[in-house]
Amino acid sequence: MARVTDEPAGVSSSAEPYGSENLLPRQPAAPDSVAQPGKARRSPWNRGRDRLIAGAIVVVVAVVAAIVAATSDNLHTSRALAEPPHALPTPPTSVPGSMTQLWQAPSSATPIPIGQSDTVTTADGSEVAGRDPLTGQIRWHYTRENLQLCTVDAAWGRVNAVYHKTMGCSEVTQLDPATGRITAQRNGDAELGTRLVNDGSHVTTTGKHLLDTWRDDLVKSMEYGKVPFLQNANKQPRPNCTYGTVAAAADKIGVIERCPGDRTDRLTVYKATAEHEDEPKVTYTALLAGKRARVIAMSGDLTGVLLPDQNLYVVYGADGSQKAAYPMDLPDADTANDPVGGTEATTRTAAGIYWYTGSKTVALSRDDLSPRWTLDGTLGPGITFATQLVVPIRGGLAVLNEMNGATLRTVGIDRGAYSGPVRLTALGPVLLEQRGPTLAALR
């Protein structure tokens, strides 16, 4: 603690008091002690070994920083947004007598053309792009330069882009098709080669060992199969099975299972939601009459299944009981293998469901899934365009009577050297064709 005195400022406290005198002889002052220079303490970082350690730390930090920078999602993501587009012209009242190609673009990640919100969405490599339907000009884009797209599809009026990251197709970004704005994102466990199956309320990823289901904000509502990073055991009914085709409707998923110990394929229908996402609520499961079975379509509580070995198409009810069976003799090439991605090529209109077998188009009733008519020599299922049913055929389109399948007329389209399957989508006056890895716009 500092000593406080009453001395005036500037007066030394060592002076003799005024009026006093020291009469004793003064002692000789001792010489001032001078500290001898000693050896300064050596810095711990002056030794060669310490400098090497410090250098190694700097190198490690630099390498880690470089790795983080090289793998940073933000660093490898580029995007451009757009204002909502102008409205397209209204579609014609009937299919035009001739159509010409407006433009085409690579779009290998879209199994089906995506046209909504007056925008065409293409997806190829790492880029998802929103294009002007009439010119093909890119209006917005979302690009992950260090990741490759697995698949891109539309649901809930939005675009869902699934990217391959680390293990399988594990990163999903949902985009507004009009502006390119991100509306949701998630990490998932979808397998390589996955496709998205949409029932109107939920989307399910296909796979050989695991099916994941999401609601419209991409929150997982159900998982079925061999769950990675399993937390709760004995929740999945048959985790060692492999899966064939998948379909969905009315918040239910139907899947063909091939399980150890089963002599034939199995049809299982389960709910898209449950109290716990890892504990499926199975509506029913039933052994089928043969192998190589394929779920074709679902409508309400009904499920249509193809049994190629029996040359039958069978409709099952809400409890798994057989409601009806119809002869369905298809070429071996149509049924030799499961379809790519585990989904059948089907479309829906207000009047029916259309199934492309690989060589013909079969019309199914939306009410009871019964076959109504068949058109041979087609390239894909049908859609409604300009108020009429159109089906792709070699050299163009067939305009059909939707009630009986009668051909009203044909429209020629030049597809160049391409002769494979064609998937259609209509967007106003523009008809979109998915030709393998290429999307073409026609008017």
Image (tube, rainbow, N blue to C red):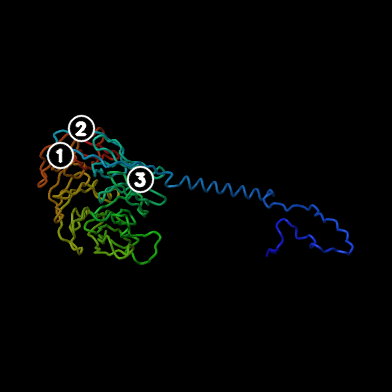
**Callout 2 secondary element:** loop
Query: What amino acid is found at the position of numbered circle 1 in the picture?
Result: Ala
Q: Judge by depth and name the residue closer to the eye, 94 or 315.
A: 94
Q: Nearer the viewer, mark 3 or mark 1?
A: 3
**Which quadrant of the rendered structure holds the C terminus?**
top left
Label 1 crowd bin: few (<14), some (14–19), many (20+), radius 10 Å:
many
Number of marks drawn: 3
Label 3 crowd bin: few (<14), some (14–19), many (20+), radius 10 Å:
many
Query: What amino acid is found at the position of numbered circle 2 in the picture?
Result: Thr
Residue lying at the far bottom of the rendered structure: 234
Mark 3 vs mark 2, CA separation in Å: 30 Å
**Callout 1 secondary element:** strand
Label 2 crowd bin: few (<14), some (14–19), many (20+), radius 10 Å:
few
Instruction: Name the residue beneath numbered marker 3.
Output: 149
**Callout 3 secondary element:** strand
Q: Earlier in the sequence, mark 3 or mark 2?
A: 2
Q: Judge by depth and name the residue closer to the eye, 112 or 29.
A: 29
Mark 3 vs mark 1, CA separation in Å: 33 Å
Instruction: Name the residue beneath numbered marker 2.
Output: 100
Task: In the rendered view, tell whether residue 191 sits above or below residue 391.
Answer: below
Residue at image coords 84%, 63% = 21
Residue at image coords 72%, 52% = 42
Q: Earlier in the sequence, mark 1 or mark 2?
A: 2
Q: Earlier in the sequence, mark 3 or mark 1?
A: 3
Mark 1 vs mark 2, CA separation in Å: 16 Å
Residue lying at the far front of the rendered structure: 19
Tell me the tag on residue 98. Answer: none
Query: What amino acid is found at the position of numbered circle 3 in the picture?
Result: Leu
Instruction: Name the residue beneath numbered marker 1.
Output: 398
Q: How far across and down, in percent of the image, does residue 245 sit?
A: 27, 53
